Image (cartoon, rainbow, N blue to C red):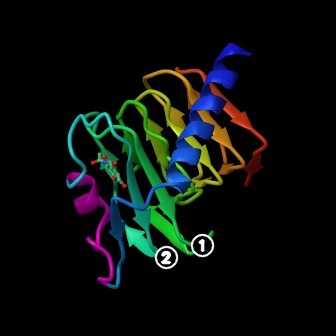
Amino acid sequence: MYIPVIAFLLLQSLLATVSAQPPNLTVALDGTGDYRSITKAVGAIPNNSPNLFRMYIKAGVYNENVVIPAKKRIIILSRDVMDKTKIVSTRSWKISGHGIGESVIFIVNNASPEGEQVVALRMAGNFIAGLRCSIEGFQDTLYANHGSCHFFYNCDIFGTIDFVFSVASLVIQNSIIHVR
Ligand SMILES: *[C@@H]1O[C@H](CO)[C@@H](O)[C@H](O)[C@H]1NC(C)=O
């Protein structure tokens, strides 16, 4: 029980903070935000900051392979309407940050069922959490290759084979795991 409780409390506190905080930065494909690309926006997050950073991603399909390095910490990614913000990546998302709350973002990759394994979300940091995420891939969708204690709540996770695997403690609660 210890790890789920800690992770859940962490997620709850991050989300409570987030609802009270305007975004630090907005990403929009149509130019109405601070950046058009998530990658550029990640570059603008201050390094090693102890403060929460909220990145708001407006509706759109973002064709990017996003890497969030370890020095970008405590980030909340929140998106517009469910199903209207998608990140289509050909490689994986990689999150190495410590204490990132990876929240309400739609993560998808365009791998095919016949193709080779493509990790949609690779977690290499600590305390990565997802709330109302959809993580979609085929082989090896969700992978924690490092770190400790990740938590997913109210998420959908899609895959074909070996699609949730982890060396860290990974708790998935109130979620649907779709075998396709
Ligand atoms: C994000 O913005 C809030 C104010 O809304 C501020 O307190 C916080 O320090 C900012 N985060 C970073 C990492 O600069």
Q: Compared to 91, does 50 lie above or below?
A: above
Q: Nearer the viewer, residue 5 or 180?
A: 5
Occupied quadrant, residue 152: top right
Badge number at residue 59 = 2
* Residue at the image position 40 percent from the left and 54 percent from the top: 54
Q: Nearer the viewer, residue 112 or 175?
A: 175
Q: Are marks 2 and 1 in contact (CB under 8 Å)?
A: yes
Q: Indicate yes or no whether the magenta region holds residue 122.
A: no
SS category of the residue bearing label 2? loop
Left or right: 47, with 118 as reference point = left
Q: Which residue is mark 1?
A: 81
Q: Point out the image quarter for the N terminus.
A: top right
- What is the tally of numbered marks visible in this picture? 2
* Residue at the image position 59 percent from the left and 73 percent from the top: 81
**Residue type, mark 1 in image:** Val
Find the magenta span and give its range.
Answer: 31-43
